[in-house]
Amino acid sequence: MSRLAYIGFAIAILFILAAIFAPFVATHDVAAQDLAMRYFPPSAEHWFGTDGLGRDVFSRVVFGARISLEVGITVVVISAIFGTFIGSIAGFYGGFVDKFLSGYVFNVFMAFPGLLLAIALVAFLGAGQGKLIAALCVIGWVGYARVMRGQVLKVREYDYVMAARALGASNLRILFTHILPNAIQPLIVQASLGMAGAVLSEASLSFLGLGIPPPAPSWGTMIEEARQFFATSPHILLFPGIAIALTVLAFNFIGDGLREYLDPKQRRR
């Protein structure tokens, strides 16, 4: 894999460890307020400074990693499972089933910009982490379904699949034993890139007030609260913004590296 992929893995592992051990990494209580310490710049006591309520920005960024990664991983897992199932059915059976799923259902979801559809769903369902995850899953499964459909359409024509069919293997056995294990590689890349998209979408919706409601330390919410004070206290916005950028870049680097590694043509090149 490329050097950028290893850098991406290192950054991702760093954020994952920070999220898992957030209570031990954080230096202050994320909800503790000290109005006498409002808008203090970075110092030895407050590494990333304090916000408008005197809360420690470093601790809130650390706990924000837990929220963002929890949302991202949940969305990717649910979307990948559902999308794999629908895409496999469409690609394996073909005909009217494929025409209905890929020609109508997929296109209906793809016709709307993803973030706008998520905004509409969250506005309808209401704010909250569970509802945010549900909205992102609704817009996220289509990408996995399209990838899996294309892979199944290709793999089902291979000789070993034809041989299994000639030997009388059932459709379920052919699909789960012979096709899916050999069609799953692009889904791994899609999941890595989808993780970056889910983190960015969560931050965007929280910034708009439609994601994780305060006082939860979501990175998007922190940026929204700090944007009007950027001129006087840039550190409040800068550090959660850097956290979002690094997380998204890390998973994009991982996705690109996995694509090169899993593709024999690019690996030889």
Image (tube, rainbow, N blue to C red):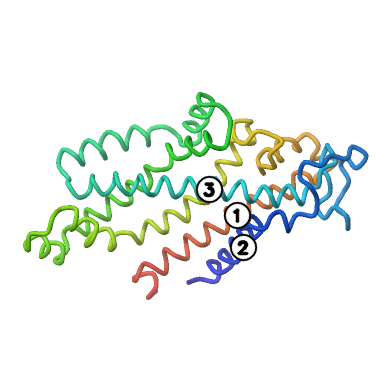
Residue located beneath label 3 in the image: 72
Which type of secondary structure does the marked residue at label 1 adopt? helix
List x then y, in percent, for residue 163. 10, 65
On the image, which quarter does residue 217 sit in? top right
Contact between marks 2 and 1 (CB within 8 A): the answer is: yes
Which residue is painted at 53% across and 57% down in the image?
251
Label located before the other in sequence (2 or 3): 2
Work out whether mark 2 precedes mark 1 in sequence or the reverse, and give the earlier one: 2
Is 115 left, or right, of 104 in this rendering? right
Q: Residue at x 27, y 55 (%)?
A: 151
Q: Amino acid at mark 2?
A: Ile
Give the SS element for disc 2. Answer: helix
What amino acid does circle 1 point to? Thr
Residue 23 rendering spot, x and y as whole percentages: 71, 54
Number of marks in the image? 3
Q: State the separation of the CA atoms marked 1 and 3.
A: 11 Å
Task: Give the Cα separation between the discs numbered 2 and 3.
Answer: 16 Å
Q: Position of residue 107 (x, y in %)?
A: 32, 35
| Structural crowding at the residue carrying mark 3, measured as other residues with C-alpha within 10 Å and reported as few (<14), some (14–19) or many (≥20) | many
Identify the secondary structure beneath mark 3. helix
Q: Real-space Cα distance between discs 2 and 1?
A: 7 Å
Is 111 or 254 nearer to us in this picture? Answer: 254
Residue occupied by mark 1: 247
Label ID, residue 11 = 2
In the image as oriented, which residue stretches furthest toward the top? 124
- Residue furthest to the front in view is 23
Residue 237 badge: none
